[in-house]
Image (tube, rainbow, N blue to C red):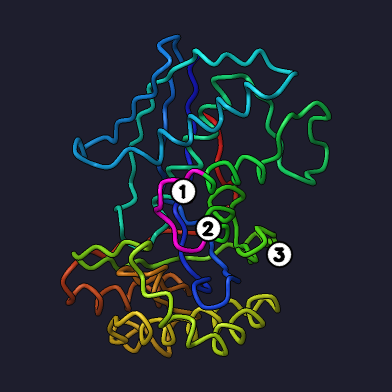
Amino acid sequence: MNGRATAPAAGTVLNALATGVGSAFAIDADTTAEVSLDDSGEIRGEIADAPDADTRLIERCVELVLESADKDSSKDGDSSLGATVRTESDVPMASGLKSSSAAANATVMATLSALDVEIEREGAEGGQEDAEMTREDACRLGMQAARDVGVTATGAFDDASASMLGGVTVTDNNRDELLSREEVSWDVLVYTPPEKAFSADADVERCQRIAPMAELVADLALDGDYGRAMTVNGFAFCGALGFSTGPLLSALPDVDGVSLSGTGPSYVAVGGREVLEGVQERWDSLEGTTWLTTTQTDGTRTI
């Protein structure tokens, strides 16, 4: 009764803090979870290379999946089940790159795999008719866990759906509704300053003051104009959250889009590879780390 799954990180097109509508895109940097079920009745979490890290999120993810299986008459749920869950990640924590969503998605999918629950992407053509849960449903379990332990300010369906489904998604986080999803193939540049920023600590009231700008960004994203949407979002939320617009200005006008990712401190830019390499040289002069990657369209998957 073991399961393993991997989930991608994500960058921001639109931060959902202002209006509840958000947009994010999966990037090729992963968090992997391994779950081993047992009959201990206890759930124990571990995060690789971070022995003192808070493991409540991944433990709550396992707990919710086990509760869901216990209530499902088609499964032999067992309230005495316990588990050990261990995650390891290429994604820096508290950096605005959706590390919590990736950890939650990977843990949920690994637990479902350990229970032999059949998963299928909602609406997928040629999918399994006997699938017991859609990927969106699995995603919502991870979101509920994030809310239960207080690591999200918005519910983060935009971040979680991009990580679970891959590609770029636009969501209404107030209703947990997927408004659009598109597969994209972008080169991506990431800059992460050394400081950390926890999304649950973000000043929601300041972000709500820029709601008109967020509504404009949502319109652009729903029209598929993701690059301009990112850039408008970046300037608006740097102002609301108190981050420097310097990295944005140094990337323009060369890139297709550039933004603060999540509630910071990371910045993400998309565009041609050579263009991004030139921006990387400029961003390398800043304190922190930069790395080039690509978008990811497969989403969370068992391994």
Between the residue at mark 1 and the residue at mark 2, the CA separation in whole angstroms equals: 7 Å
157 versus 142 height, above or below: below
Asked if disc 1 and disc 3 are in contact, CB closer than 8 Å, the reply is no
Q: Given the image, on which type of amino acid does mark 1 rest?
A: Ala
State the residue position of label 3.
180
In this rendering, the answer to whether 23 lies above or below 129 is: below
Q: Which of marks 3 and 2 is nearer the N terminus?
A: 2
For the residues bearing labels 1 and 2, Cβ distance under 8 angstroms:
yes
Rendering coords of residue 148 (x, y %): 46, 46
> Label 2: how many residues lie within 10 Å, few (<14), some (14-19) or many (20+)?
many
Q: What residue is shown at x 57% (from left), y 27% (from top)?
A: 67
Q: What element carries label 2?
A: loop
The residues bearing labels 3 and 2 have C-alpha atoms spaced at a distance of 17 Å
x, y (%) of residue 62? Answer: 48, 30
Q: Is 268 included in the stretch rendered in magenta? A: no
* Residue wearing tag 2: 155
Numbered disc in front, either 1 or 3 = 1
Q: Identify the residue shown where x is 25% and y is 80%.
A: 282
- Which amino acid type is shown beneath numbered disc 3? Ser
Question: What percent of the width, then of the height, locates residue 185?
Answer: 57, 62
Residue 46 vs residue 268, the one in the foreground = 46
Stretch in magenta: 145-156
The residue sitting at 58% across, 71% down in the picture is 20
Residue with the mark numbered 1: 146
Tell me the quarter of the picture where residue 177 sits.
bottom right
Residue sitting nearer the eye, 30 or 19 = 19
Mark 3 residue element? strand
Within-10-Å neighbours for mark 1: few <14, some 14–19, many 20+: many
Amino acid carrying mark 2 in the image: Gly
